[in-house]
Amino acid sequence: MGPAAPKHVYYYRCPEHRKNYVLSFAFCFDKEDDVYQFAYCYPYTYTRLQAYLDSLERKGLDYVQRDLLGLSVQQRRLDLLTVSHPDNLTDEAQKRVVFITARVHPGETPASFVCQGLIDFLVSSHPIAKQLRDYLVFKIIPMLNPDGVYLGNYRCSLMGFDLNRHWQEPSPWAHPTIYACKKAMIDMYNSKDHDIDFFCDLHAHSTLMNGFMYGNTFDDPDKQERQNVFPKLFQQNAEDFSLTNTNFNRDAVKAGTGRRALVGIFDDSVLCYTLEVSFFSYMANSSGGTLPYTEEGYAKLGRNLARTFLDYYKVQSVIPSMPVAGATGKSKGGGSGGASGGGAGGKDSSSRYLMGEASSSAGRFGSGGGRAK
């Protein structure tokens, strides 16, 4: 199937569709026996995810654990991956948790490529991945809306719900995957051996370019400044990450999203973000040129997300600047702590040197237009 001629492709706000954007193009179906398929972006199916997780599980890595967290309405798997050094996963170990989710909106396939890039890096033999596994416990749900993905929906579940508006009071029968995810996080938060540091939900954006983040706003300037640090570090690692589009808000209509609902449950130490990436292209920070995203480009953003966690936890004095030879997450002691230790200075004092660069009194880095997830 060849591409449609550019002169027959239109993307516009349509008054007949409540001024939503419409993509239209002309195409000639010239072979009756052929099957034609159209994709808004690179496809990433439920079947592909299951094949990927099966292959990962067959490797028998002792630092990767796959669990069935629950089932969707149509009885599809809600998988939970845990990636960490085995010593961090014992009952006695204190666990510092980074929680990642993706594909709550089934049509946003770039989120799956970002998520797989993150997973591939975390399970690799790269020295940074080893450091992250030594000190942190990554909990990853690669597909929050498996029914919607399987059915080819763009935004909703089997029953027509936008699951990213039902985090406040999810129903175990209507929104079982959100219910199971939220319950698992709250159980960890309330347990004595888990400290949740991050929640990050992966999405794709149809109008803005680059990768960027949405976060929450706070009246406390110190709390707001601390939340600004991670996006600033992210930009230093990823040439396609935009601080201009990064935006913090607390709009009432977004109260049902994961980042908004969970920040109201957790204490001030937990950072909640949405990571967005364009369906289409990015403007490179180095050259200023516009480049199209590829599957590898999305995966690279996931790898750079992992690298940014290392930089962030070095700033927090959780991970030492120089690797500790032969150390594991269970045995690391002193000021850095083990898989949960925060260091003597705590989270706020150790990140002060970044605050001048990363803070913004308005709670945002740039204009950050578009729909907040």
Image (cartoon, helix red, strand yellow):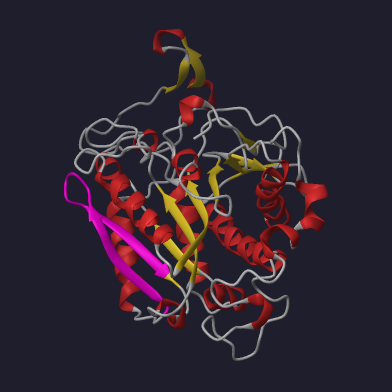
Asked if residue 66 is among those painted magenta in the image, a careful observer would answer yes
Asked whether the viewer can see residue 239, the reply is no
Quarter of the image for residue 165 reads: top left
Query: In the shown orientation, is residue 245 left or right of residue 57?
Result: right
* Magenta stretch: helix, strand or loop mostly: strand
Q: Position of residue 305 (x, y in %)?
A: 59, 58
Query: In the shown orientation, is residue 352 left or right of residue 42?
Result: right
Query: In the shown orientation, is residue 20 left or right of residue 143?
Result: right
* Quadrant including the N terminus: top left
Q: Position of residue 135 (x, y in %)?
A: 56, 75
Q: Position of residue 109 (x, y in %)?
A: 42, 45
Q: Position of residue 225 (x, y in %)?
A: 72, 46
Q: Residue at x 72, y 50 (%)?
A: 232
| Range shown magenta | 63-82
Outermost residue toward the left in this view: 74
Residue nearest the viewer, comparing 47 with 24 = 47
Query: Is residue 4 shown above or below 122?
Result: above
Q: Residue at x 76, y 44 (%)?
A: 359
Query: Is residue 361 shown above or below 98?
Result: above
Residue nearest the viewer, comparing 117 with 364 = 364
